[in-house]
Image: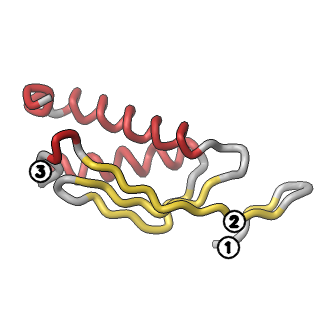
Amino acid sequence: MSTQRSNSHTVSRLTVHIVWLIKYRYSVLEGDIQIYCRTILIQICDSEGVQILKGVVSKDHVHMHIDYRPSQSICELVRSMKGRSSRKLQKEFPELSKKY
C-alpha cells in the first residue's frame, strides 16, 4: 500500500481522525450490532474510495482515521457514513428504532 495518492498532476496524502457519538450516548453498539456497524462502515468507505487507516467501534462512539481524495468533502463523507449506517442498522435491528 502506497502512502500517497497520485493523479496525473497531483500527489496528495489527506488524512483525518473522525469521532462521532451515538445519540444520547446510549451504549447500543454491542455484540452483533457492533460487528454489523463495522462491516457497514467498511462497505461505505470502499464504495467512496476512502481508505480506513484505523478504526474502532466502541459501545457509544466510533473512531475512524481515514485517508481520502482531495476532491472529496469531509462533511459529505461523515454525513454519508452516519446516515447510511444509521438507516441500515435501524432496518436490520428494529429494537434500535424504539430507543430513538
Q: Is residue 22 left or right of residue 28?
A: right
Quadrant, the N terminus: bottom right
Contact between labelled residues 1 and 2, with CB atoms less than 8 Å apart: yes
Q: Quadrant of residue 97?
A: top left
Mark 1 burial class by Cα count in 10 Å: few <14, some 14-19, many 20+: few
Q: Is residue 31 left or right of residue 76?
A: left
Any mark on residue 29, and which?
A: none
- Residue 42, position as x, y percentages in the image: 42, 51
Identify the mark nearer the N-term, 2 or 3.
Answer: 2
Marks 2 and 3 sit apart, C-alpha to C-alpha, by: 34 Å
Any mark on residue 13, and which?
A: 2
- Residue 84, position as x, y percentages in the image: 38, 33
The amino acid type, in three-letter code, at marker 1 is: Thr
Q: Look at discs 2 and 1 and give the one toward the viewer.
A: 2
The residue singled out by tag 3 in the image is 27
- Residue 41, position as x, y percentages in the image: 39, 48
